[in-house]
Amino acid sequence: MALVNSTVKNLSISGSSEKILLIYRLLWISGLRPDNFTFPYTLKACADLAIFDGRSIHTQILKSGFSLNVYVANSIIDMYSKFGSFQPARQVFDEMADRNLVSWNLIISCYRLNGFPNTAVELCCSMRYESVVLDKVSMKIILPACGQLRALRLGKSIHAHMITSGLSLDVALTTAVMDMYGKCGSLNTAERLFNEISCKDVVSWNALISGYSQIGKPKMVIELFQKMRVAGTSPSIVTVLLVLQACADLGILQFGDKIHGYVIKLSLSLDVSVQTLLVEMYSKCGKLCSASCVFNGISEGTVNSWSAIIYGLGMHGYGKASLMGFFGMLKRGIDPDDVCFLIILSTCSHTGLVSEGCNVFNYMVKHFAIQPKMEHYASMVDLLGRAGFIDEAFKFIRLMPTEPGISVWGALLGACKIYGEFEIGGVFEECLVESGCKTAGYYKLLLSIYASKGRWDDVARIRGLMEKREVERTSGYSLIEISS
């Protein structure tokens, strides 16, 4: 078996997973039995090839008595984690008589990678309570979960542990801490850590740029990107995506064109994620022809790329063309998601396609079984209200299977203001008070209605409520790019 295990090990290093599984089957046929060295490599081969025979191998491990071996048990957890099967992975973990640090790291990683950051954080806390000390791998696993959950307190304690463990000079780990602070909104701390890194790589730059992108500061994204280029660091696809989104948010066409040039130079022009953001950027910058040109060059469209061009057509007032794009997507076998339906409903609302919008909403619910979110309901109320169907909009609200949110009432009140029907104002004010909303637009809408009716006492009361809740009265502005 020593020669077999040596061969299997070498095959694993070279990535020959198919040959490993062949040897494993030949062992059973020849009457030989795998051992605690053979099983882990075989399980890894199953995971690499996404072959679910790993479950039958798990059964054979149980029968062979090797499930008590820590190394084998860890390999089983790792395999199930890569399959996205966290429940059997957790069962193996819970049944382990002896766990080591690798066991904890694997199960925490399993939950984080499969969309359960809360459980990952809970396990991290349990790990510490059982006096298992976090290592560098543990920190890199749990820090993204802290950022995702905005668990700043835990993130800070891990950062402190990193410093006391003498790992503060590890660039990759410092970058992970930076990313955590950025996601938690502590950009000052993230930037301080960034400035302390002597050899900044593209991952470090991306972590800081991403932090400013997430808190809605696209100007800082552009500024950091320019500093990054001056520092001589080449952008990655992540950088390009972040900067393109910033260009789209700011409507900066000239800079967006430069980024498009980088995309071509970096050979990223065929990446569908980049192409999708280029479509969005050009649409928001008013260059629908360029957006269409990029979209037409996408070889395999996704729901996101189709949603981008549907949105672009809709925002430029081409409601019918937007609908044609939607049905074109369906013909190609691409199923729309809830975001795509929200885009097409909003397009129908702004272009006056009332019956089409109603049909799309019903299609979403009945054909695709997508549960409408509050945004979908608000779009439907806006669709009906904008067209003057106030009674129908109010009836739609009454028939909603869930309690209407402030966005729904706001859509109805906006329509009432347009058509001079103000009876709903009291209902909206009650909803506004109960919700604790701080969105200035809703308050301004109610203020304008009360002011138009000469109800100055009500105006004073709403202004007092705005001051009490510290609602920012942001003035409107236009963003225009001027070519030099």
Image (cartoon, rainbow, N blue to C red):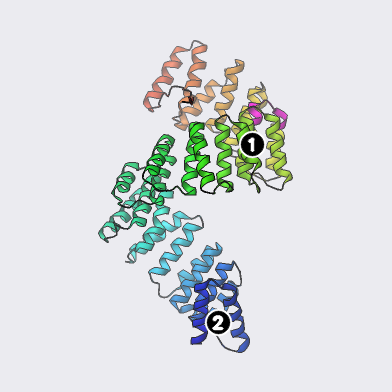
Taking the image as shown, residue 444 lies to the left or right of residue 132, namely right
Task: Please state which amino acid type lies under the numbered disc 1.
Answer: Ser
Magenta stretch: helix, strand or loop mostly: helix
Residue 384: percent from left, percent from top? 66, 26
Q: Is residue 205 visible?
A: yes
Residue at 57% from the left image edge and 79% from the top image edge: 60
- Residue 281 sits in which quadrant? top right
Q: Count residues near mark 2 (Cα–Cα under 10 Å), then give few for <14, some for 14-19, many for 20+.
A: few
Span shown in magenta: 347-356
Residue 173, magenta (yes or no): no
Residue shown at 47%/40% (left/top)? 243
Say if the magenta span includes residue 349.
yes
- In the picture as drawn, the residue positioned furthest to the right comes out as 331
Q: Which mark is residue 110?
A: none
- Give the residue at mark 1: 292
Between the residue at mark 2 and the residue at mark 1, the CA separation in whole angstroms equals 60 Å
Instruction: Examine the rendered structure and indicate whether residue 227 appears above or below residue 46.
Output: above
Q: Secondary structure at mark 2?
A: helix
- Of the image marks 2 and 1, the number of the one nearer the N terminus: 2
Vertical order, 143 against 248 (above or below): below
Q: How many marks?
A: 2
Residue at image point 33% right, 44% down? 191
In this view, the residue in front, 200 or 49, is 200
Mark 2, residue position: 63
Residue closest to the eye, 271 or 142: 271
Camera sees residue 397: no
